[in-house]
Amino acid sequence: MRHGKSKANAEKLIVSHPEHGTTGYGLVEEGIKQATESVTALHDQGILDASTIIVTSDFLRTRETAEIARAILGVEEVTVSELLRERNFGDYELQSTEHFQEIWGAEDATDPTFTSHEVESPASVHDRTTQLIRELEETHEGKKILLVSHGDTTQILQTAFQGISPAEHLSIPHMQTGEDRKST
Protein backbone atom coordinates (compact mmCIF):
# COMPACT_ATOMS: atom_id res chain seq x y z
CA MET A 1 0.00 0.00 0.00
CA ARG A 2 1.20 3.49 -0.76
CA HIS A 3 0.74 6.03 2.02
CA GLY A 4 -2.14 8.48 1.85
CA LYS A 5 -1.66 11.93 0.38
CA SER A 6 0.91 13.84 2.41
CA LYS A 7 1.88 17.44 2.90
CA ALA A 8 4.82 16.81 0.51
CA ASN A 9 2.40 15.49 -2.15
CA ALA A 10 0.12 18.50 -1.67
CA GLU A 11 3.04 20.93 -1.94
CA LYS A 12 4.57 18.97 -4.87
CA LEU A 13 7.86 18.58 -3.03
CA ILE A 14 10.35 15.74 -3.12
CA VAL A 15 10.81 14.60 0.48
CA SER A 16 12.99 11.51 0.38
CA HIS A 17 15.69 12.01 2.98
CA PRO A 18 15.10 10.67 6.51
CA GLU A 19 16.10 14.04 7.98
CA HIS A 20 12.90 15.53 6.57
CA GLY A 21 10.68 12.51 5.98
CA THR A 22 10.78 10.86 9.40
CA THR A 23 9.78 13.98 11.33
CA GLY A 24 7.71 16.05 8.94
CA TYR A 25 5.38 15.96 5.97
CA GLY A 26 2.68 13.77 7.45
CA LEU A 27 -0.75 13.11 6.00
CA VAL A 28 -3.18 15.83 4.97
CA GLU A 29 -6.94 15.34 5.52
CA GLU A 30 -7.37 13.84 2.04
CA GLY A 31 -4.60 11.34 2.81
CA ILE A 32 -6.26 10.29 6.06
CA LYS A 33 -9.47 9.70 4.11
CA GLN A 34 -7.65 7.74 1.38
CA ALA A 35 -5.90 5.48 3.89
CA THR A 36 -9.11 4.93 5.86
CA GLU A 37 -11.11 4.03 2.76
CA SER A 38 -8.45 1.71 1.34
CA VAL A 39 -7.88 -0.24 4.55
CA THR A 40 -11.60 -0.39 5.32
CA ALA A 41 -12.24 -1.88 1.87
CA LEU A 42 -9.50 -4.49 2.39
CA HIS A 43 -11.01 -5.36 5.77
CA ASP A 44 -14.57 -5.50 4.44
CA GLN A 45 -13.44 -7.82 1.61
CA GLY A 46 -11.89 -10.15 4.18
CA ILE A 47 -8.39 -9.58 2.81
CA LEU A 48 -6.98 -8.05 6.01
CA ASP A 49 -7.95 -8.59 9.64
CA ALA A 50 -6.62 -8.38 13.20
CA SER A 51 -4.05 -11.12 12.47
CA THR A 52 -2.40 -9.01 9.75
CA ILE A 53 1.25 -8.10 10.18
CA ILE A 54 1.74 -4.40 9.36
CA VAL A 55 5.20 -3.27 8.29
CA THR A 56 5.86 0.36 7.42
CA SER A 57 8.59 2.73 6.34
CA ASP A 58 9.87 5.00 9.09
CA PHE A 59 8.72 8.14 7.27
CA LEU A 60 5.94 10.07 9.03
CA ARG A 61 3.45 9.78 6.16
CA THR A 62 3.75 5.98 6.09
CA ARG A 63 3.70 5.60 9.87
CA GLU A 64 0.49 7.64 10.03
CA THR A 65 -1.05 5.48 7.28
CA ALA A 66 0.03 2.32 9.10
CA GLU A 67 -1.50 3.58 12.35
CA ILE A 68 -4.80 4.13 10.57
CA ALA A 69 -4.60 0.53 9.31
CA ARG A 70 -3.70 -0.72 12.78
CA ALA A 71 -6.72 0.99 14.33
CA ILE A 72 -9.17 -0.21 11.65
CA LEU A 73 -7.93 -3.78 11.69
CA GLY A 74 -7.45 -4.04 15.45
CA VAL A 75 -3.79 -5.05 15.07
CA GLU A 76 -1.73 -4.71 18.25
CA GLU A 77 1.42 -3.19 16.79
CA VAL A 78 3.10 -1.87 13.68
CA THR A 79 6.64 -2.86 12.72
CA VAL A 80 8.82 -0.06 11.33
CA SER A 81 11.49 -0.90 8.75
CA GLU A 82 13.99 1.43 7.12
CA LEU A 83 14.07 -1.04 4.22
CA LEU A 84 10.68 0.33 3.09
CA ARG A 85 11.89 3.94 3.05
CA GLU A 86 11.23 6.31 0.22
CA ARG A 87 13.72 6.09 -2.61
CA ASN A 88 16.30 8.75 -1.83
CA PHE A 89 16.29 11.40 -4.55
CA GLY A 90 19.58 12.92 -3.39
CA ASP A 91 20.27 16.42 -4.70
CA TYR A 92 16.59 16.86 -5.61
CA GLU A 93 15.53 16.82 -1.93
CA LEU A 94 12.95 19.52 -1.11
CA GLN A 95 12.72 20.51 -4.77
CA SER A 96 9.72 20.33 -7.10
CA THR A 97 8.33 16.95 -8.08
CA GLU A 98 8.79 18.10 -11.69
CA HIS A 99 12.34 16.73 -11.31
CA PHE A 100 10.95 13.19 -11.19
CA GLN A 101 10.66 13.27 -15.00
CA GLU A 102 14.42 13.88 -15.32
CA ILE A 103 15.15 10.86 -13.14
CA TRP A 104 12.51 8.55 -14.53
CA GLY A 105 13.20 9.50 -18.16
CA ALA A 106 16.60 8.59 -19.51
CA GLU A 107 18.25 7.55 -16.25
CA ASP A 108 15.93 4.92 -14.75
CA ALA A 109 14.86 3.48 -18.07
CA THR A 110 18.39 2.82 -19.29
CA ASP A 111 20.43 1.95 -16.22
CA PRO A 112 18.96 0.45 -13.03
CA THR A 113 22.25 1.13 -11.20
CA PHE A 114 22.64 4.85 -11.97
CA THR A 115 23.30 7.20 -9.05
CA SER A 116 23.79 10.62 -10.64
CA HIS A 117 22.81 13.58 -8.45
CA GLU A 118 23.11 11.19 -5.47
CA VAL A 119 19.78 9.56 -6.43
CA GLU A 120 19.35 6.05 -5.04
CA SER A 121 19.30 3.59 -7.92
CA PRO A 122 16.32 1.36 -8.72
CA ALA A 123 18.66 -1.62 -8.22
CA SER A 124 19.43 -0.47 -4.67
CA VAL A 125 15.74 -0.04 -3.82
CA HIS A 126 15.05 -3.46 -5.37
CA ASP A 127 17.78 -5.08 -3.26
CA ARG A 128 16.70 -3.61 0.07
CA THR A 129 12.99 -4.26 -0.42
CA THR A 130 13.46 -7.83 -1.60
CA GLN A 131 15.74 -8.39 1.41
CA LEU A 132 12.81 -7.36 3.61
CA ILE A 133 10.42 -9.67 1.74
CA ARG A 134 12.77 -12.62 2.27
CA GLU A 135 13.02 -11.81 6.00
CA LEU A 136 9.25 -11.47 6.34
CA GLU A 137 8.62 -14.73 4.51
CA GLU A 138 11.00 -16.54 6.85
CA THR A 139 9.49 -15.14 10.04
CA HIS A 140 5.81 -14.86 9.09
CA GLU A 141 5.16 -17.77 6.75
CA GLY A 142 1.49 -18.05 5.83
CA LYS A 143 0.54 -14.72 7.44
CA LYS A 144 -1.14 -11.75 5.82
CA ILE A 145 1.27 -8.83 5.63
CA LEU A 146 0.44 -5.22 4.82
CA LEU A 147 3.45 -3.21 3.64
CA VAL A 148 3.04 0.57 3.84
CA SER A 149 5.57 2.40 1.72
CA HIS A 150 6.09 4.97 -1.05
CA GLY A 151 5.33 5.29 -4.77
CA ASP A 152 8.73 4.50 -6.32
CA THR A 153 9.58 2.00 -3.60
CA THR A 154 6.41 -0.04 -4.12
CA GLN A 155 6.67 0.05 -7.90
CA ILE A 156 10.29 -1.07 -7.83
CA LEU A 157 9.36 -3.85 -5.41
CA GLN A 158 6.63 -4.92 -7.82
CA THR A 159 9.29 -5.52 -10.49
CA ALA A 160 10.68 -8.25 -8.24
CA PHE A 161 7.25 -9.88 -7.93
CA GLN A 162 6.83 -9.71 -11.71
CA GLY A 163 10.35 -10.96 -12.45
CA ILE A 164 11.38 -7.92 -14.49
CA SER A 165 14.32 -5.54 -14.22
CA PRO A 166 14.02 -2.70 -11.69
CA ALA A 167 14.71 -0.38 -14.63
CA GLU A 168 11.23 -1.31 -15.88
CA HIS A 169 9.39 0.01 -12.82
CA LEU A 170 7.76 2.71 -14.94
CA SER A 171 6.09 0.02 -17.05
CA ILE A 172 3.96 -0.75 -13.99
CA PRO A 173 0.96 1.55 -13.56
CA HIS A 174 1.74 4.43 -11.21
CA MET A 175 0.56 3.82 -7.68
CA GLN A 176 -1.69 6.60 -6.41
CA THR A 177 -1.61 7.86 -2.83
CA GLY A 178 -3.63 5.58 -0.58
CA GLU A 179 -3.75 2.85 -3.23
CA ASP A 180 -3.30 -0.80 -2.34
CA ARG A 181 -2.15 -3.61 -4.56
CA LYS A 182 -2.54 -7.25 -3.73
CA SER A 183 0.27 -9.72 -4.38
CA THR A 184 -0.02 -13.44 -3.82
Image: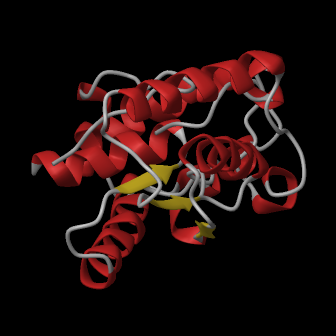
Q: Position of residue 29 (x, y in %)?
A: 81, 19
Q: Residue visible at 89% across and 55% down?
A: 23
Residue 164 vs residue 38, the one in the foreground: 38
Residue 176 placement, left or right of 47: right
Q: Based on the displayed image, in which of its 4 quarters is residue 98 positioned?
A: top right
Question: In the image, what residue occupies the spot 68% across and 53% down?
Answer: 90
Visible in this render: residue 165? no
Residue 140 versus residue 164 in the image, above or below: below
Q: Please identify the quarter of the rendering in which residue 171 is found.
A: top left
Number of marks in picture: 0
Furthest residue to the right?
24
Judge by depth and name the residue closer to the eye, 33 or 13: 33
Residue 99 in percent (x, y) is at 64, 27
**In this rendering, is residue 23 above or below 141?**
above
Whether residue 87 is visible here, answered yes or no, is yes
Q: How is the image coloured?
A: secondary structure
At 42% across and 35% down in the image, what residue appears?
43
Can you give x and y, in whole percent of width and height, for residue 177 in the image? 57, 25
Q: Is residue 52 above or below residue 156?
A: below
Q: Is residue 22 left or right of residue 59?
A: right
The residue nearer to you, when weighing 124 against 39, is: 39
